[in-house]
Image: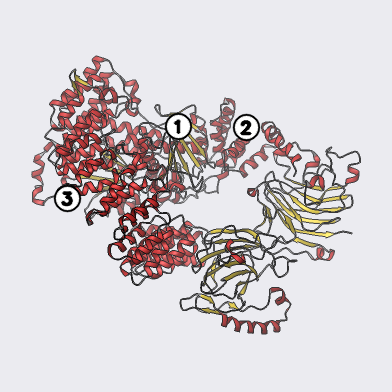
Amino acid sequence: MNYKKIFPVLLLLLCANLFALQAQINRTTQTIIADVLAQMPAGNQADYTKQLGDLASTGEEGVLALAKMLKAPGQGSNASVEYALSGLANYVSGLKDASVKQTAVNAFQKALDAASAPETKAFLQDCLRTLGIGYQPVASASNALPKVNKNSPVHLRIAALQADILKTVNNKEKYDILFIGTMMLPVEKDKEKELTAKVLSALKDPSIEYRNAALNFASPFAGKDTYVGLAKALRKAKPEVKTDLLNWFGRESKLPAKSDLIKNLEIRFDLPLRQVLYDELKNKDPEVRKAAAWALVKIGDSTSIPVLASLLTEKDNPTIKLGKETLASFKGDVAPAVARIISQATDAGKIAAVELLAQRKASAHINTILELTKSGSPDVKKAAYTALKDVVAEKDFTLICGMLETADETTIAPLQQAVITAVSFMDAKEKVATVTRRMLVAGESKKYLYYIVLASIGDDSVPTLVSGFKQGTGAAREEAFNALLAWKDASVADELFAICKDASAPTYFDRALAAYVKLVSNPSITGENRLLSLRKAMEIARTNDQKKAILRQIRNAGTYLSLLYAGEFLDNKALQQEAASAVKDIALNHEEYTGANVKELLTKAAAVLDNPDAAYERQSIKTHLDKIPDEAGFVSIFNGKDLTGWKGLVENPIIRAKMKPDQLAKAQIKADEQMRKDWKVTSDGLLMFDGSGFDNLCTVKQYGDFEMYVDWLLDPSGKEADAGIYLRGTPQVQIWDTARVKAGAQVGSGGLYNNQINPSKPLKVADNKLGEWNTLYIKMIGDRVTVYLNGELVTDNVILENYWDRKQPIFPVEQLELQAHGSKVYYRNIYVKELKRPEPFTLSAEEKKEGYKILFDGTNMFEWTGNTADYTLKEDGTITLMPSHGSGGNLYTKDEYANFSFRFDFLLTPAANNGVGIRTPLEGDAAYVGMEIQILDYEDPVYANITPYQVHGSVYGIIPAKKGFLKPLGEWNTEEILAEGDHIKVTLNGNVIVDGNIREATKNGTPDHQEHPGLFNKTGHIGFLGHGSEVKFRNIRIKVLK
Amino acid sequence: MQTNRRDFLKTLGGVALFTVVPRHVMGKGFIAPSDQLTKGIIGTGQMGRGHVNYAGTRLVAVCDVDKSHLELGKNLVTDKIAAYHDFRQLINDPNVDIVHIATPPHWHGIMSVEAAKAGKDIWCEKPMTRTIGEGKRVMEAMKQYGRMFRLNTWFRFEDSFYGMNTTVKPIKKLVQSGLLGWPLKVTISKHTGFDWKFYWVGKEYLEPQSIPSELDYDLWLGPAPYKPYNIHRTHQTFRGYWDYDGGGLGDMGQHYIDPVQYFLGKDNTSPIKVEVDAPQQHPDAVGTWRSITFTYDDGCQIVLWGGDYGDPNTPYIAGPNGNVYKNFVCDIPNWEKKLADYPEPEPQNADFTECVRTRQPFALNERNAFRSATIVNMGAIALRLNRTLEFDPAKLEFVNDEAANRLINQPMRSPWII
């Protein structure tokens, strides 16, 4: 499709309303219902509005027809009809147009009258209720006072009191606000007096429930007089009543409508409410003191801060604690008041004060804290040192460093923390330099004190710490180690692993391993790499607790190989619970992990699970197992013991195919002998190439479409480390040492190295360090290859070219090979999952005889050029244009054709638009620089107004096609385009829809009044012309005519 | 005349002590069984049975409409306890102080109101109620009868907070300080560490099945519309049906949203708008959704993203001056230092038995829990109607949308009323 054609479509979309109307006139109610049902449930609001708008336009007829389709329970699913009808009721209920609503109501009522099954009736009644018919809310009896529970004397009395209060304030009409609102219900002055009197009398009641119910109920009506009255009563009340009242005053002051009133409340002209509360801070009853202090916090008047601070100078610990907690929650600057009372406080009070200053990061009071570091009390001293990290500023760096370098053992750690804070405020570029300078000042014997500071900065100081660990002794070595443990990111993981393996440092093993496991389990690392590192940890772990911790992280890694690896521990009594939950969680979170080994591991996991939830876990495993399709899935093709299933390499696939069977058999015996020399299985179950030649290891089995996993490790000892995976006997997914810049290896492994036309380099470098394991995942569909290296996409659906004969496509089936390239390499975890694919298309005997040639048989796109990325080969053996890949683009035959019969199948999606360009150059708009045979789902309403020479099959703009022979959407169409000189004939599903002569058709000018300069081209390419719609093609063949 | 057990204790005061073994004889720290608050659990499925472990109270009664669940409930403790089929019997049992409601949500409203009428305090599972109207009625009942209510989610006070890996307290402090600016947008999604549990979806078609003999299906349905029995409607999978709950949103909504409401300081109000982006919902079976966005009158937003939807790099809290990401990572340099002048959030009353004794509201009570349940229910209504709705937080009704307002107070099957 070209840009000129876009215009009418755009216009159609812009005038959607007009054309929708047009479309509806053209479509019968039955068609609309069928269309709507096919698209229920709507995937998004735009579709929803469109579909239900269409349905609404059918009026009564649509509703009645749909309602008739409702089956009684047990007769099958009503889902799409239920979506349509309930959707219609919901949709119409939101429209402003009353007449549409009324039509729907009438229709649903008629449908209800006609319905017989009670469940059908109930469903239609629901739809009617949505539209407001027959709706009777049962909830919310909020206009009446409660019926009381006569069995409960307190509740009888509460209800009576509430009725009494309501009678007093006569505000029943605002009942809702009373219960849900947070606002006031102001009452008249004299009524408020009555209310106050009632609450006061309620407060004399011995029942705490009664008192509090009365206070809560009175809240919305309470105004200034009530508060004054209750505050006066508070002064004289019993302790338990004081507590109720103080808590209540606190809650009231948090109500936005009340807060100012309470904050400024005066009981008398010289007695503010807060003074009453201050007095209660001295009450003998701790509950009263507590309630008073918290009420002050809630009221939040900053003049209360010094009063609360004075609590810190009390002798008893609960009061000091109360002071500390209330000040911590007090809004405003509490530090000056706290600093002021420190000298009068006991040790406990001093500690609380120091902790408060730390909490508020009170740098202005650092001197107060420094003073206390000299305290005679060890506890005070400790608290002061601990607080330093919270109150230091950048300017204090030198001072704190001085203290650190002369510190005793007990104060080193807090002073280091203080240095870390001071450094954190510095300019990022200055941090390491400043600390390094200070280390020089401190000298050899003290520089280790700053290792932990370096760790807090990160950056490039790992080598300093590593050499500090290796060369240091005693405290210095310990500090370097702790600094490595404190390091922020995974860059020290290898160092920690080295420490684990260092036999001369056994005391560090447990801590180093725990830190290593934590670092390599970071979710920012791919699951594949997490598993590789965790396997290393597992291999050196010593205790069951360590192994359990590793298995828990393997569960989080979540990859297929993680599942299999965890499964290896199901038989280990000590570890099987962790292993089982890893297997369960990974499998249940990844429905794509199918196959016999997954099923087997899940079944085993279900059997060993033993925890309080095990019954439920077993149930969910069972549900999951039932969902797993019955297929082999990934199958291990290397048994870890010998070379069963493998053979030596004989020549290449093309030569092999030409060899006679006995000749090949002989060569195979020789190749197998060589294989046994070169390829070994190590004692720990790895597959190793240890030869010097280039004799690949080959699978006995041949593979078509497949997915595969393989772990590989290049031995760093040799020169020019190199390997690869041959796919269908063809080189190769590249594996090499990225340091080999001369060979171009800096691009990384995982590319299709021998490609010349299609991409050969990986998308990114995802290799692990030389000498470490790597995980490859390869997927091959037809001639397309996708590769993930260590969890990163490096080759994205790229065509693999045939290295052995570039004039032919990749072999449809062939063996897999592990490449030998003269350098030592190890493999493990080799799993292959064979993917089902349709049989390749073959010509009928008749077509073969006639001389047809296949251009696409479902296995490769070798005959094609142009946008081979958007037109992709899919598992179903089709060329599919994927609209998500962009606007589309064109796909052309590599060869040119003049006169021909071109046959193909195609499958449309709703409103799909494409076209077959013929006799066209590779550049330009084929409809004009060549000729276009239209492909279009012209029955879609958006195309209601197109011209006859735009419908499917027409020679675009030149010769119209007959309508009415497209198969319904979802079914494949077959088509033949015959081009013989000026004669063009198009046959769709056996019906000739175009049979014309382009010269005759244009003798009076082109029917579309456009220039078609390429119309009479003698020859050119054949192409599919995309316009962003998903369209599928298959079984493409051509016969060249003389 | 029957009397409430605790009234009885209080009335007799010290005398009661002499009728049981004096406390000092039992040793320090021992609470005589007769002094301890008691509880009864309605609904002894998996969730309800877990309630036996909530400390501070002694289990004296259980209730379930499924005989096999009731049997499991009876065996929760070694003592012989009362076992009821009908919740009204448990509610009126004078030995029960606190009623734990662990039924599917379509029962929460009625049971809470009935328990309040009977003078019980209430510990109710989330979501508080499945309609806004029932929630309102529960709120009224608590005030009318002077009862204490606690919603069973912990994230507002003590539990570490899913994707944030901290309790809500430091988040509250940061948000309260205003350092992030205002208004804030909070995104609750897989990318910020939350899972909307889309496996709680219903089936659009259920083959009618015969009702198991151990289940009283009529009483299980209670106020819900009658629909033919199928096992998938009940027990562990009921969340997939609008009649009883609201899928993953119903299950996790209040867990995830309530702490957000708390740290945004929205306990006394509700959003004024809800927008949805979702596939059309089936009238019976709950489906999935892509996003639900709630907007408050000051511009603050709570955004829910279902499944994998949305930008993976999105912050949990986004403000004009800074963001908070998963695992409580704030991108404002030295933010902790900048919070120096800001107070710690006030401690909350997080011990329900203490609240029952002192009659001070629990931290997550019927009033603020009603507001967070209302957010969940607004989302469910917007999903079911598949359109943007506006809401009046004071009147508690939708603006200019009668159909939405009809979902505020949904009909109940006779004879049930609230």
Q: How many marks?
A: 3
- The reply to whether label 3 and label 1 mark residues of one chain is no
Q: Which residue is mark 3?
A: A378
Is B262 situated above or below A696? Answer: above
Q: Report the side of B55 relative to B129 (left or right).
A: left
- The reply to whether label 3 and label 2 mark residues of one chain is yes
Residue ID at (43%, 41%) = B323
Indicate the quadrant containing the N terminus of chain B: top left, top right, bottom left or bottom right.
Answer: top left
Task: Mark yes or no: residue A602 visible.
Answer: no
| Quarter of image, res A710 | bottom right
> Does dot 1 land on a helix, a strand or a loop?
loop
> Does dot 3 land on a helix, a strand or a loop?
helix
Q: Of A774 and A212, which appears nearest the observer?
A: A774
Q: Which residue is mark 1?
A: B299
| Residue A455 spot, x, y in % from top left | 37, 55
Q: Report the side of B306 relative to A296 (left or right).
A: right
Residue type highlighted by circle 2: Gly
Query: Which is closer to the viewer, label 3 or label 1?
Result: 3
Indicate the chain on which mark 2 is placed: A
Q: Which residue is mark 2?
A: A59
